[in-house]
Image (cartoon, helix red, strand yellow):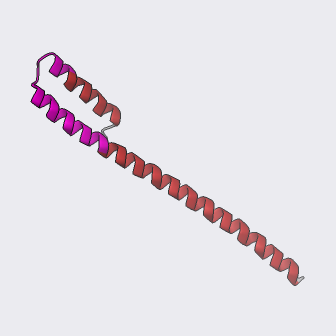
């Protein structure tokens, strides 16, 4: 089974709604399906947010390390010049 996306959930919600409107499922069944789909959608959103945050944190960490390393190199060059 592949990864379920927010668009997949949206399509299922629309399908459930249309089946309810056509009288193919009861209000109770439509409510239960929608509740389940909303919970799945929330889980997808949280997971995607966590992934984005992790990428941002990694990028900031790399950026911080680059800045630290650049400053370290500058200080080492200054120290070498002073020793000469």
Where is residue 67? Give x, y as percent.
67, 63
Q: Please tell me whether residue 17 belongs to the stretch shown in magenta.
A: no
Residue 68 as seen in the image, left or right of residue 12: right
Residue 50 visible, this angle: yes
> Foreground: 28 or 14?
28
Quadrant of the snapshot with the N terminus: top left
Q: Residue furthest right?
A: 84
Q: Residue furthest bottom?
A: 83
Question: Does 42 appear above or below 69?
Answer: above
Q: Please tell me whether residue 32 belongs to the stretch shown in magenta.
A: yes
Question: Does 12 appear above or below 77?
Answer: above
Residue 2 visible, this angle: no
User: Would you identify the image quadrant in which residue 70 lies?
Assistant: bottom right
Residue 56 as seen in the image, left or right of residue 35: right
| Majority secondary structure in the magenta region | helix
Question: Does 77 appear above or below 50?
Answer: below
Q: Residue at x 10, y 30 (%)?
A: 28
Q: Which residues are magenta?
A: 18-42
Where is residue 44? Give x, y as percent.
33, 43
- Numbered circles on residues, count: 0
Where is residue 84? Give x, y as percent.
90, 82
Q: Residue at x 33, y 37 (%)?
A: 5
Q: Residue at x 72, y 68 (%)?
A: 71
Q: Residue at x 46, y 55 (%)?
A: 54
Residue 43 as seen in the image, left or right of residue 82: left
User: Would you identify the image quadrant in which residue 69 lies?
Assistant: bottom right
Question: Does 80 appear above or below 41?
Answer: below
Where is residue 18? Give x, y as percent.
21, 20
User: Would you identify the image quadrant in which residue 26 lies?
Assistant: top left
């Amino acid at each position: 089974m592949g990864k379920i996306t927010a668009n997949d959930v949206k399509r299922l919600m629309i399908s459930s709604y249309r089946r309810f409107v056509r009288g193919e499922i009861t209000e109770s069944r439509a409510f239960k399906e929608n509740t389940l789909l909303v919970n799945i959608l929330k889980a997808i959103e949280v997971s995607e947010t966590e992934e984005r945050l992790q990428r941002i944190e990694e990028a900031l960490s790399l950026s911080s390390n680059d800045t630290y390393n650049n400053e370290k190199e500058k200080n080492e060059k200054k120290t070498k010049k002073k020793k000469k």
